[in-house]
Amino acid sequence: MLPRWLNGGEATPTRYLEIVETVAREDASAGWVLSQTIVAGVAAFYLRPEIARTIFGPPDAVVAWGSAPNPVAATAVAGGYRVTGAWTFSSGCRHATWLGAHCAIAGTAEERTLLFPKDSARLTDMWHVLGLRATASDSYAVEDLFVPADYTITSMYRWPGKEAAAALTARFTATGLYAPGTAAVALGNARGLLGAVVDLARKKTPRTAAVPLRESEVVQTTIAEADTRLAAARTHLYDTIRLCEAAAGREGAVPLDLRMRSRAASTFAILAAGDAVAALYRLAGSTAIFEAEPFERRLRDAYTLSQQIQSRANHYATVGRHLLGLDVDMRWI
């Protein structure tokens, strides 16, 4: 999704989802890191071209950022900002060349993302987790770091600024990309497990059983139901994002009703994929518990995805409040 003038593909959100889902079907951690760092690349649309080339021009360029466990405020100073703080869940930070710090600006209502070379920060190895282990989503911290104003952007978690209006992808908020991106990872991971279970059912005969797994009506029903649920969730997600793209192309932004619909479709797909994984895992029996097999890793990755902030079921409440005409917190829309 980098700009074409940076030799990027300037892919649409739908194409982004297709790529992330395809990679996650092979490995959820790889799909997850792609989903996060590709969105960070949209920052290039907010920067002056020469600054964007400095950050994103090298062939190995990757920007990663995380969330702050405690609010961080940067202080405006002559020529830029000074900041001290820490951020966690920085997927891809070990491969990154630059990092970003989401900050409030002290004394204002403004939020900005400050970009700086990775060697300006101190990374901490904290990613010892159940699943998505290969994302190395570690933490980083800076102390009294000066960041020139030209290396900062309007927070992509708020409504995109007019400086990015020319690019379709940049007409989405960061959450408007991260939420369906998380869903694409979940769907790809679930599809990968479904394929593994089908392969196993074709050749395995459980101990004490008279027939192979493939002859069991329970197995047949569970596989068909999982396939249908995943297909339905995927279709709804992609159809919704295509509607968002069309509206953004016409109107210069994604209308609020469609942003809400995208939020609900993303949440539904993530949760549906997690339910499918749990049901499919049980079919594999004792084969599923061995690390040499693909099943236990798919389950761990699915459960870790289900704990991510984009996966919270209470996002439905936000959408429901909107449908009822009530005020809502727009942070995750």
Image: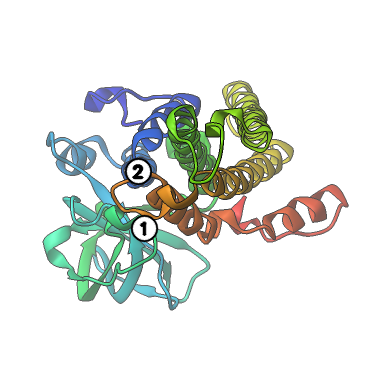
Vertical comparison of 188 with 175: above or below? above
Residue 136 visible, this angle: yes
Along the line of sight, the residue nearer the viewer: 150 or 272: 272
Q: Position of residue 261 (x, y in %)?
A: 70, 39
Vertical comparison of 114 with 269: above or below? below
Vertical comparison of 204 with 146: above or below? above
Q: According to the image, label 1 marks what residue?
A: 113
Task: Give me the residue at 31% from left, 53% from top.
Answer: 291
Q: Whole-Å distance between the Cαs marked 1 and 2?
A: 9 Å
Disc 1 vs disc 2: Cβ atoms closer than 8 Å? Answer: yes
Q: Quadrant of residue 231?
A: top right
Residue 43's mark?
A: 2
Image quadrant holding the N terminus, namely top left
Q: Where is residue 284 in the image (x, y as percent from the top left)?
A: 49, 44
Callout 1 crowding tier (Cα within 10 Å): few <14, some 14–19, many ≥20 = many
Q: Position of residue 209 (x, y in %)?
A: 55, 41
Along the line of sight, the residue nearer the viewer: 64 or 46: 64
Local SS, label 1: strand
Task: Give me the residue at 36% from left, 58% from top.
Answer: 113
Along the line of sight, the residue nearer the viewer: 282 or 126: 282
Name which of mark 1 and mark 2 comes first in the sequence.
2
Amino acid type at circle 1 is: Thr
Q: Which residue lies furthest to the right in this view?
A: 324
